[in-house]
Image (spheres, rainbow, N blue to C red):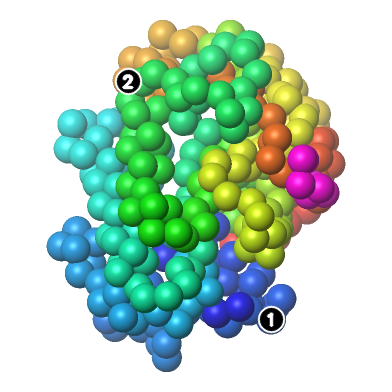
Amino acid sequence: MKILISGSSGLVGSGLITHLSKKGHTIHRLLRNVQKMGDGDILWDPSHGDLDHNKISSFQAIIHLSGENLSNWFWTDKQKVRIIRSRVDSTALLATAIRRLPGPKPAFLCASAAHYYGDRRDETVSEESSAGKGFLAGVVQKWEGAADEARFAGARVLHFRSGVILTRQGGFLSKIMPVFYLGLGGKLGSGRQYLPWVTLRDVMEIIEFCLQRTDIEGPVNVVAPQEITNRQFTEQLAALLSRPSFMTIPASILKFIFGEMAEEMLLSSIRMKPGVLLKNGYTFQHPTLQTALKSVLSEEPE
């Protein structure tokens, strides 16, 4: 397939280009910096609504991964606006461009997040579950809704509601590893909150799986099938590193340091099932946390 990817310099995007290229797909990038462009790349500027829809007419699929990093130190009002606009504006721009194309539309595969469901405590959620409450749940609803123009125009639209992506190359695990190596790792708050997780390897395989399965559309929960709490995650990671895990960071301290971000990202509980993937026969490369962490810890850090 001929595929266009946004967010190609991010954690998922950079790895996905290599993964899909090895599988024989032709990959082009959507870029904002003209100096980084290569042959076949397309220039765009979502903040100003700049994208020539004619330039995307030859692609069979568009994979949209762009978005402001959620895990900055503290969410100011300005940061919240950037988080929303970086997702909604860019998605709406691509959806409008797809709508304007004559003939068959490319598949539109969009990044999304587990935060759609909000803090659900012990409730198990699937793709059919209702949206949750809170800032991030609202962001994801707007984010996914921004693709409606493409959907209404007949394009196959998917939303990858990803959990925490495990890899040593960046993200959550790379940030906490130094703490665990020092023997200071521990649960966050009560530790009873569910942590939806998936390995980067599975994310790549899932995206390709959904590219090929033209009957899959709508939300897709990109999480491993094993449900894990923060306490269980902490204990298993510490055990594999031969480090203690007796520390606890009280919820009050996390809220004092990180504010609203702590409540929605560190202390919220999202117990997700990958219903669509299991129903359609996807086989996880890393279905359990133990096998996942063993594989991830064997990666060479960049």
> Residue at 44% of width from left, 21% of height from top?
132
Q: Residue 286 location, x and y as percent?
A: 80, 45
Q: Of helix, strand and loop, which mostly describes the magenta segment? A: loop
How many angstroms separate mark 2 from mark 1 (CA)? 45 Å
Q: Secondary structure at mark 2?
A: loop
Amino acid identity at mark 1: Gly
Closer to us: 61 or 270: 61
Occupied quadrant, residue 169: bottom right
Q: Compare marks 2 and 1 and give the one earlier in the sequence.
A: 1
> Residue at 78% of width from left, 53% of height from top?
298
Residue 13 is a magenta residue: no
Q: Secondary structure at mark 1?
A: loop
Closer to us: 161 or 263: 161
Determine whether 211 is above or below 102 in the image. above
Tell me which segment is drawn in magenta: 278-284
Determine whether 211 is above or below 87 in the image. below
Q: Residue 88 location, x and y as percent?
A: 30, 47
Quadrant into which the C terminus falls: bottom right
Closer to us: 251 or 87: 87
Q: Which residue is mark 2?
A: 259
Determine whether 178 is above or below 168 in the image. above
The reply to whether residue 207 is in sight is yes
- Foreground tag (2 vs 1): 1
Q: Which residue is mark 1?
A: 24
Quadrant into which the N terminus falls: bottom right
User: Is residue 289 toward the left or the right of residue 88 in the image?
Assistant: right
> Residue at 19% of width from left, 58% of height from top?
47
* Tag of residue 139: none
Amino acid identity at mark 2: Gly
